[in-house]
Amino acid sequence: MDVQNQRRSMEDIVIKICGITDITQAETSVDAGATHIGLVMAPASPRYVSDEKAREIVSAVKDRVRVVALVVDENINDINDRAAGLGVDAIQFHGGETLEQIAALERPTFEIWKAAPARDPAGVAAMAEWRDVAQRLVFDAPPPSGALYPGGHGVRFDVSVLSDFDGSLPFVLAGGLTPDNVETAIASAKAIPGFRGVDVSSGVEAAPGKKDPGKVAAFVAAAREALASPH
């Protein structure tokens, strides 16, 4: 895999609505102007979708939006076949998957995204070692103590913890984003090398796993305006 060439072609903006659980929510996100949707394949999550449901959603929107499947400590050995069967554009590894495990994947046909909790500047800076394996990072808030799944808790983190990241690969900002705070979050992240967009889940929901169409539309509109702003 020519990672450098892939990365150059992927340095576009991301506005991702994650935790989509049905076709209607996917359509709502597409109509609002999202660039990506996320399907959570982790059974512990209230936004979990089965492989069968994921295939239905992908089939409905595959020509209009890019689809990211989020997995947590799944069997790495069958991830190529699973991604192909789902028809997704990217796999977001959101668990304890190691650099060595992902690097051992043979000729993946999907983008590799790696999520990481933004606990401290040193940990964030260390994620640069993924530059030859992943196409994107997702910096998320550390999950609350005792959480059964790693993301989607509506928890924010101080974006300044990312300030030492060297921008060696693109990253997406996640964690506690809402239509009301996404502009401020983007303004804070714009100066950090590698920043490419935002990822939201609980911040646009009426209830866990149930996206609110008005919040989705407001989030995408606010994110697009902030990302297009020169300031």
Image (cartoon, rainbow, N blue to C red):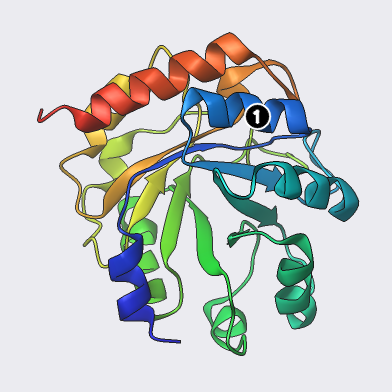
Circle 1 sits on which residue?
27
Mark 1: which secondary structure?
A: helix
The answer, for residue 42, to whether it is visible in the render is no
The residue at 32%/52% (across/down) is 12
- Give above or below for 92 relative to 228: below
Picture coordinates of residue 60, whole percent (x, y): 73, 42
The residue at 51%/61% (across/down) is 113
In this view, which residue lies farthest toward the left?
A: 230
Q: Quadrant of the C terminus?
A: top left
To which quarter of the image does residue 90 belong? bottom right
- Give above or below for 47 relative to 125: above
The answer, for residue 212, to whether it is visible in the render is yes
The residue at 36%/53% (across/down) is 171
- Give above or below for 214 relative to 32: above
Kindly identify the amino acid type of the residue bearing the numbered disc 1.
Glu
- Give above or below for 181 relative to 116: above
Report crowding for label 1: few under 14, some 14 to 19, many 20 or more residues within 10 A (C-alpha).
many
In the displayed structure image, the side of residue 162 where residue 138 appears, left or right: right
The residue at 58%/60% (across/down) is 89
Instruction: Name the one closer to the observer, 187 or 164.
Output: 187
Picture coordinates of residue 213, whole percent (x, y): 62, 14
In the displayed structure image, the side of residue 33 where residue 105 appears, left or right: right
Instruction: Name the one closer to the observer, 60 or 36.
Output: 60
Picture coordinates of residue 110, whole percent (x, y): 57, 70
